[in-house]
Amino acid sequence: MSKICVLGLGYIGLPTASILATHGHQVVGVDVNQALIRRLRNGEVHIQEPGLNTLVQAGLNSGKLKVAEQPEAADAFIIAVPTPISPDKRADLGYVESAARAILPYLQAGNTVILESTVPPGTTAGMFASLLAESGLDPWTELKVAHSPERVLPGRILEELVSNDRVTGGLTPAGAQSARDLYASFVQGEIFMSDATTAEMVKLMENTYRDVNIALANEFALIAESIGVNVWEAIATANRHPRVNVLRPGPGVGGHCIAVDPWFMVQCAPGPSQLIASARRLNDRMPEHVVEIVRTALAKVKGNKVAVLGLSYKGDVDDMRESPAVTVVRWLLASGCEVLAYDPLISPEVAADPHHGGLKVAVGTVDEAVLDADCVLLLTDHSPFKQLDPSAVGNMMRHRILVDARNGLPHAKWEEAGFTVQVLGRGVQPGPQSDTAVTNGFHKSTEAVPA
Ligand code: SAJ
């Protein structure tokens, strides 16, 4: 059992520090945000994550976890700070650099130093090792340095920190082994050892794989719209093949990982990364496509007021980072639409906070959002939206149009309530006898088809 200093008390650092503290280690959680440290000292946890509050309190009450603005001498240091993306799509390693500099005065020969933040391949062996060398210690022979990326899913962080397999990529075999020993104190999954650059690439490959597959689903949706096919039915049927699993089209890819990490791969090898860059650009164009669908629907009724449902980057999470919903709202506003948005998990104050969405259009109830609206636009498939009463919603609106960018609502119910329903990826073709369009596909059903 050892003393561990965890730098960065965000989505990964705080759960990791608390788990280590409840597994016998003496832990100092460090963050440069003074207000955050004050709140944590008062027992206030700033991240909504099942079980986290209880775990942090347990750590603090047992005295095994303490929080501070400065690191202290320890046996091991874990750096879990953000690596945002710069406007030119390169990793901003500023927080990693500050965290590494902050531990320099406390480093001692034999210490373990683990970088958990997602970084472009080559960062640990390059920039990070060079910084650590400024301590006067040789990172290859006098320290045990490793990169060990997290792979947890928001909403299941505590569970997955323990149960997921993990990779520890060392600057040296001793670095990989030492990081492995540390994580083995709480990880129940398998821990694979490798070198630092491979571990960096593994993390980026996982998220890039997902981004490219979502891009493929989005491209299928665009093709389906242009040839009059219902992509949701097509995907559900294609996925009956034992070796096919097409993901879900949507209004774009958000969150702090999948929409960002592929660019780190492109950054380190732009020449060969053609497919990755192209997938990223396609996913980034989806918000604009959704806006086009909405504007076309609004033009038919000469309306301009949109009620947006959902602002977070995916269903049933309260996180607005890189949310495509925020981009769609900005585009709608820029194109002259009036917008009011409702998200059951995000308060209007949080939505307006520049550190979150910076959107001043959020309201506290569905009713406020839909009053006098010409169109309801579903951008995030939060579970409670499925229970909405379309008649009650329609009665408050000026025109009954629903645009569903997630295929997340029971469309037959909405159509029964008099709504014209437009679904992303659901192509239509002109009916033979009339100028009205019919939905393609054998089902002919407008019910959401699970993909
Ligand atoms: N999305 C689609 N279609 C899909 C799946 C997702 O449009 O079929 C969109 C979502 O709506 C969202 C975005 O992609 O905007 C990302 O959502 P996600 O559920 O794929 O991933 P995250 O960002 O919540 O968490 C991911 C996790 N990766 C997965 O493969 C599920 C997690 O394992 C990683 O550890 C995490 O990123 C991370 O920190 O890297």
Image (cartoon, rainbow, N blue to C red):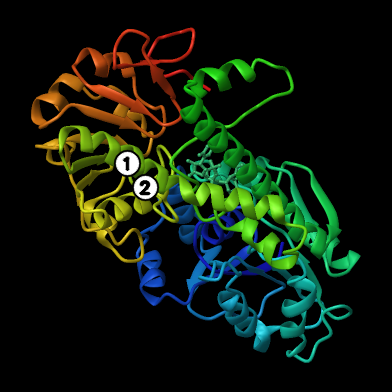
Q: Position of residue 36 (x, y in %)?
A: 39, 69
Q: CB under 8 Å between callouts 1 and 2? A: yes
Q: How packed is label 2: few (under 14 Cα within 10 Å), some, or many (20 or more)? A: many
Asked if residue 433 is positioned above or below residue 232 in the image, the reply reads above
Residue at 29% of width from left, 17% of height from top?
435
Q: Is residue 141 left or right of residue 37?
A: right
Q: Position of residue 144 (x, y in %)?
A: 81, 72
Residue at 81% of width from left, 82% of height from top?
109
Q: Mark 2 highlights which residue? A: 325
Three-letter amino acid code at the position of disc 1 = Gly
Residue at 56% of width from left, 63% of height from top?
64
Secondary element type, mark 1: loop
Check residue 52 in the rendering and tell me which mark sits there, or answer none. none
- Quadrant holding ligand 1? top right
Tell me the quarter of the picture where residue 393 sits.
Answer: top left
Secondary element type, mark 2: helix
Q: How packed is label 1: few (under 14 Cα within 10 Å), some, or many (20 or more)? A: many
Asked if residue 298 is positioned above or below residue 148 in the image, the reply reads above
Residue at 32% of width from left, 7% of height from top?
433
Q: Mark 1 highlights which residue? A: 310
Q: Position of residue 417 (x, y in %)?
A: 19, 16
Q: Earlier in the sequence, mark 1 or mark 2?
A: 1
Q: Is residue 412 left or right of residue 130?
A: left
Tell me how far mark 1 sits from mark 2, CA to CA.
Answer: 7 Å
Three-letter amino acid code at the position of disc 2 = Ala
